[in-house]
Amino acid sequence: MTDTSTNVTAILADFVLNSRFENIPEDVKLESARTLLNWMGVAIGGCKHESVEIVLKTMGLRTEVGRASILGRKEQTDGLNAALINGISSHVFDFDDTHLATAIHPAGPIAAAILPIAEKRQISGAEFLHAIILGIDVTCRLGQSVSPDHYSVGWHISGTAGIFGAAAAASRLLGNNPQQTRWAMGLAATQSSGMREMFGSMCKSFHVGNAAKNGLMSAMLASNGFTSSEQGIEAKRGWANVTSTKQDYSFITEGLGEKFLISENSYKPFASGVVVHPAIDGCSQLRDEYGFKPNDVESINLKVNPLVMELTGKESPSTGLEGKFSIYHACAIAIQHGKGGENEFSDAAVNDPIAVSLRQRVKPEIDPTVPADAMGITINTKDGRTFKKYIKKALGSLENPISDAQMDDKTRDLCRPMLGDAGTERLIETCRNAANLANAADIATVATP
Amino acid sequence: MTDTSTNVTAILADFVLNSRFENIPEDVKLESARTLLNWMGVAIGGCKHESVEIVLKTMGLRTEVGRASILGRKEQTDGLNAALINGISSHVFDFDDTHLATAIHPAGPIAAAILPIAEKRQISGAEFLHAIILGIDVTCRLGQSVSPDHYSVGWHISGTAGIFGAAAAASRLLGNNPQQTRWAMGLAATQSSGMREMFGSMCKSFHVGNAAKNGLMSAMLASNGFTSSEQGIEAKRGWANVTSTKQDYSFITEGLGEKFLISENSYKPFASGVVVHPAIDGCSQLRDEYGFKPNDVESINLKVNPLVMELTGKESPSTGLEGKFSIYHACAIAIQHGKGGENEFSDAAVNDPIAVSLRQRVKPEIDPTVPADAMGITINTKDGRTFKKYIKKALGSLENPISDAQMDDKTRDLCRPMLGDAGTERLIETCRNAANLANAADIATVATP
């Protein structure tokens, strides 16, 4: 059961410290700016969520002094609590980036951990993006080495693996030496936590914030000489063996420095569970192509994988959160609004009479031959027309990623209420141009009102 | 493998909130003052350890303002970081209390979590001791329900189970309602962490501090409405099932409120691994009874369980830490000094020529018929005399606990360098009299210079 044959903690520490930005492929660099922008959007959009308010109230009392930014807000706090809060707000809508092979949402733990460092020290935009690339690589490689067993046991992998990338990226930006970086990884291993049992409660996004905060703290403690095991990942009683029945370290070592897993990062166009994305994509497309109105629709017939009904079979959702897991609501808002952002999954949108009425005309039929990420859609209108669409790979999938323009629109929807129109354009431009910034602290500046 | 038949999270939350101090047996109340005093001594003794200095340096930068005490020191910090630091310092010498059935060191996570609450709010000494009793009960019952499997997998149970007692005790003192207390337990479950792989590094005591800090944070967040699973312990993917192959909840429910596991708490008289305690006890007794000097000793012959040599077989330790795990050094300092406190396990004591010379005369012989907690000792002097002692239950074991006078002496050894003679006597008196204090904040006051 235990594999202690490799020395992956040291391998990853050396990789993170020795990587050079000029050797990173151009498409990977571009992807890191996309990841950054997508993350900023969801974090700013989520910054007034109740979870965030409670954490700020709780921790703010403890930290009367601080100079780290809270995305989307005017308050400041200390670096560790900023990492916690920005990590929470970026995951609270479940609208952040996804590494599909592991189900990890990687930007949150890593970007939230290093932003306070950029605000405290002089870090260039290139160094900042580079740290994001490396942190995501560490987290996703580690996640793959224990997937899917680790997740099946009950661990929320975005938190449990996220903390390692946070510790690694922060170690690099703090100038930790190789031993300090191995200690930071050990400190991360011994703080790795977060269970799937908490899904449905505020703890889900708390895991992401906690990974950011504790990963940053790991790197800070190690930089001051706090010791740990130097084989926190692979030791007999290290993280991989204690938390998973599978350890395949070839996912960590193979192609390290050549292939960067941020290239496999995906960004949701729709603020809902991923299995209903083909429905929103297909219904929106048919609406735009044929111009019918909600009142014209007689029925919406779907052919879906059994998993879709298992996960999103809720016929009559009453809250926005329930709407995110309703195939009925997904079709309704796509036909009503032509999109599925956070606004279309608000409590108000779920209780809108037009959406309620459309939901009742959705007829899903289970078809095991339809893959879980595909869907067959047939819309019949009252005047007897029939429109069909088979979605093989929905918008936002790795094969059909959202365009830069679509990501900008998503960012606008999320950020305008917090930053205003001009402020949102400034944020978009700054993130897209991040590789050329002399000072990455500018990213935090444009992300606050 | 999974047992979800009981609702132990709710049972424990109700128990903690409904318990009344007047119903606690007198011997349990007395034990709580002993636990408090023993914990104070080791925390104050450890307050200048390098681990503490590093954490203070790291976290102090973040929290310029704060009013919670750091035991033994003049600096103050915020409540969460005080919980972290006081938890670390109390475990850094491995000289704190032990619940032998689970190997949990229970005072650290719980007392360190609630002391900052006592400094912020008006809590009586009785309420403070009561919270310690209940927190230790929660932690040790939970630990027993998953022992020994949980520890065998690789979890450091003082941290992983300690956080629940910290969250429960803090919930009570913060006035959390039952649902908030269940949330706090869920927040504790999803932050439970700490691996045995880290033993030998600073992370070992970090686990105890982290359990205190994160347990306190769990209770604080829950009190402000941060939601979690309400079945964090027993759910299908809850703490017990995810981290252990054994779940026997009868250890949680049986005798709850009648039997208090703090009564099974033990206090080390010697600052070393527990398997060498019979050697220190026996050699000290023979020295005191027969008055021989180090130079009189020809040989020290031992009959020991195989485990003793496996864990403490180091013949020539060169540091204090190595000395703690050397049966040779244990006999040497017992004959040289007649005791085995932290001073006898310093680097200087390990390199003292008298101790080095005595070590070379120790001859352990493995005898599987000798239990692991017993030892046969035969000392031959150069003038031909022979002294024998068989230690069945060493001083500090449950069957042979240290006396109040011995605990006071241990406290004096640890605290006089930090608090002075008069200050140390004040600490001893305040802890022993804690049940009658109008304000438990006095405990923190007398524990700082």
Image (tube, coloured by chain):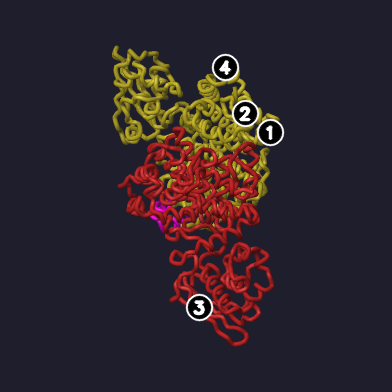
Chain colours: A yellow, B red
Residue A135 in the image: above or below residue B257: above
Residue with the mark numbered 1: A124
Residue A421: image tag: 4
Residue with the mark numbered 2: A444
- Calculate the distance from the C-alpha at mark 2 to the C-alpha at mark 1: 13 Å
Label 1 neighbour load within 10 Å: few <14, some 14-19, many 20+: some
- Chain for mark 4? A
Q: Amino acid at mark 2?
A: Ala
Which of the 4 image quarters holds residue B27?
A: bottom left
- What kind of element bears circle 4? helix
- What kind of element bears circle 3? strand
Residue at horizontal 52%, vertical 80%?
B388
The kind of secondary structure the magenta stretch mainly shows is helix
Residue at horizontal 55%, vertical 45%?
B442
Report the span colored magenta: B139-155
User: Is the residue at mark 1 from the same chain as the one at mark 3?
Assistant: no
